[in-house]
Structure formats: structure tokens, C-alpha cells
């Protein structure tokens, strides 16, 4: 009887640390895109500019992103130092994601992208999702010249959001979804005018003078919005 030879045990491949894709170019632009060039990353930053958000809130306001992709992007952004995750104290018992200082430095990048992309927004397509607070970044351009600091609550056909104006850009949310807990002024306008303001086709003062923006409030910020 022939003796069976013992086959050598197949060696298992050694575990490798996952490596993110890189352009491998000694260039600041390439390095930036290594961090934020993946699809959805900058839109996650857009959402987190409103302040800390739960995973479920992010998923709800990023229609079209899968749970796997969102989780992967958030993990990469944590590793890259753009976001941090923390546990809310009881009774919330939930975790939230928020921008780090490094992540918040992307605000002017998102603002410039919004300004650059504004001319491409025409008639809303049937497949287009929309959230009211997505108009916050373009509208900040029209409100940038205000000197009085405070919170402006904005009422559009699509809903409400609020913007912090007149002060330095801090790590706290520069805008937020829904009505403000305390608003120093409130403005109401239609979506088309909001887009026109974002494109620079008219000024805030012109729209207020023409009656296309209604300003409510008694403080100095409301007065400045009315041109008083």
C-alpha cells in the first residue's frame, strides 16, 4: 500500500491594512482630493456644517447614498481627521458626528463650489431631491455683507432653515435645518429669488426694496436687513 504524503498546509495570506486610494502626487491639490475627492464626502461636510448630526439624520438628508457607502465615508473622514464621533449624554443615548477644526476649514471650499455651481441650477428635474437647508450656502453669499451679528431665519416654499451672519465663522454650525430656537430676524422669499441671490443676479437690498423679501424683526439685524 502506498504511503499517502501529507500535503503542506496552505499558508493564509497575511492581513493587510486597508489603504485608501491616492493620486500619489506631491501636490497640494492631489493631497486634498485624497481626503475629500471621493463621492459623497463633500456633501457629508455640507450636512455637518449645520452642526452635529446623527447617522440616521445624515442618511435621511443624503438621498441616494447607501448605508454601506455612508458608513465607509464617515470612517474614512474620521481616520483623516475631518470628523469626530461622540456619544451624547443621557437621555439621548445616541452618537453624533461633527466636524473637527480641520473639517470646518472646508467651509470656504463648499461656499466656492456652491457659487461656481449656482449657474448650473435651472429648472428642477423630476428626479431632483431637495432640502430647504441646501440653499443656505448660496444664500450666505447675499448675506455676507451684514455687519450686525445674529441668526436669520429663512422661510422658503420648501421649508425653513437658519443662518448665522455678521460674525466670524466658528466651529459651531454656520447654518441649521428648521426654525431657529431664537432668531434675530426672519425673512421670507421664494426659491427662485433665493437662487438668483446665490447667482449674484440681484442684491439683498434690491429684493427687499422691491418687496420680494419680507423682513420680520425689531432688532438691529432686522433693521439692517430692511436697509434702515
Image (tube, rainbow, N blue to C red):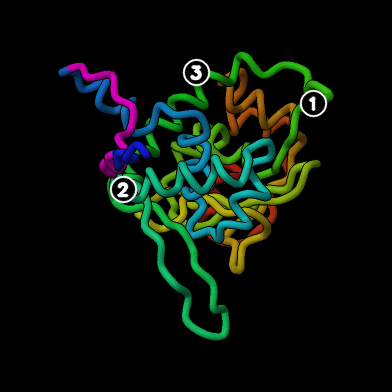
Residue with the mark numbered 2? 79
The residues colored magenta run 8-25
Q: Nearest to the eye among marks 1 and 3: give it.
A: 1
Residue 17 seen from this side: no
Asked if residue 77 is positioned above or below residue 41 in the image, the reply reads below
Task: Give 141 or 59, whichever is nearer the viewer.
Answer: 59
Gap between marks 2 and 1 measured at Cα: 33 Å
Q: CA distance from mark 1 to mark 3?
A: 22 Å
Q: Residue at x 21, y 22 (%)?
A: 28
> Which residue is depicted at the point 67% across and 32% down?
194
Q: Earlier in the sequence, mark 2 or mark 1?
A: 2
Instruction: Say the numbered circle drawn on residue 39.
Output: none
- In this view, the residue in front, 208 or 96, is 96
Q: Which residue is mark 1?
A: 127
* Residue placed most toward the observer, 94 or 102: 94
Q: Position of residue 165 (x, y in %)?
A: 47, 49
- Indicate whether residue 185 is drawn in magenta: no
Q: Can you give x and y, in whole percent of width and height, for residue 11 in the image?
A: 28, 40
Q: Are marks 2 and 1 in contact (CB under 8 Å)?
A: no
Pointer 3 residue: 116
Amino acid at each position: 500500500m502506498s504511503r499517502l504524503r501529507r500535503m503542506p498546509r496552505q499558508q493564509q495570506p497575511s492581513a493587510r491594512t486597508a489603504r485608501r486610494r491616492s493620486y500619489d502626487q506631491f501636490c497640494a491639490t492631489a493631497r486634498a482630493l485624497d481626503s475629500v475627492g471621493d463621492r459623497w464626502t463633500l456633501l457629508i461636510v455640507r450636512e455637518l456644517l449645520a452642526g452635529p448630526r446623527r447617522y440616521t439624520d445624515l442618511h435621511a438628508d443624503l438621498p441616494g447614498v447607501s448605508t454601506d457607502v455612508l458608513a465607509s465615508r464617515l470612517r474614512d473622514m474620521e481616520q483623516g481627521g475631518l470628523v469626530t464621533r461622540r456619544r451624547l449624554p443621557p437621555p439621548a443615548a445616541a452618537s453624533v458626528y461633527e466636524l473637527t477644526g480641520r473639517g470646518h476649514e472646508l467651509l470656504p471650499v463648499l461656499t466656492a463650489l456652491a457659487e461656481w455651481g449656482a449657474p448650473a441650477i435651472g429648472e428642477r428635474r423630476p428626479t431632483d431631491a431637495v432640502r430647504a437647508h441646501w440653499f443656505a450656502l448660496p444664500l450666505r453669499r447675499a448675506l455676507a455683507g451684514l455687519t450686525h451679528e445674529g441668526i436669520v431665519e429663512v422661510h422658503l416654499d420648501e421649508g425653513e432653515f437658519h443662518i448665522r451672519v455678521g460674525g466670524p465663522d466658528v466651529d459651531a454650525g454656520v447654518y441649521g435645518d428648521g426654525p431657529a430656537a431664537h432668531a434675530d430676524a426672519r425673512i421670507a422669499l421664494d426659491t427662485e429669488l433665493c437662487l438668483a441671490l446665490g447667482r449674484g443676479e440681484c442684491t439683498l437690498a434690491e429684493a427687499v426694496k422691491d418687496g420680494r423679501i419680507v423682513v420680520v424683526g425689531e432688532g438691529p439685524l432686522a433693521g439692517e436687513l430692511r436697509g434702515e
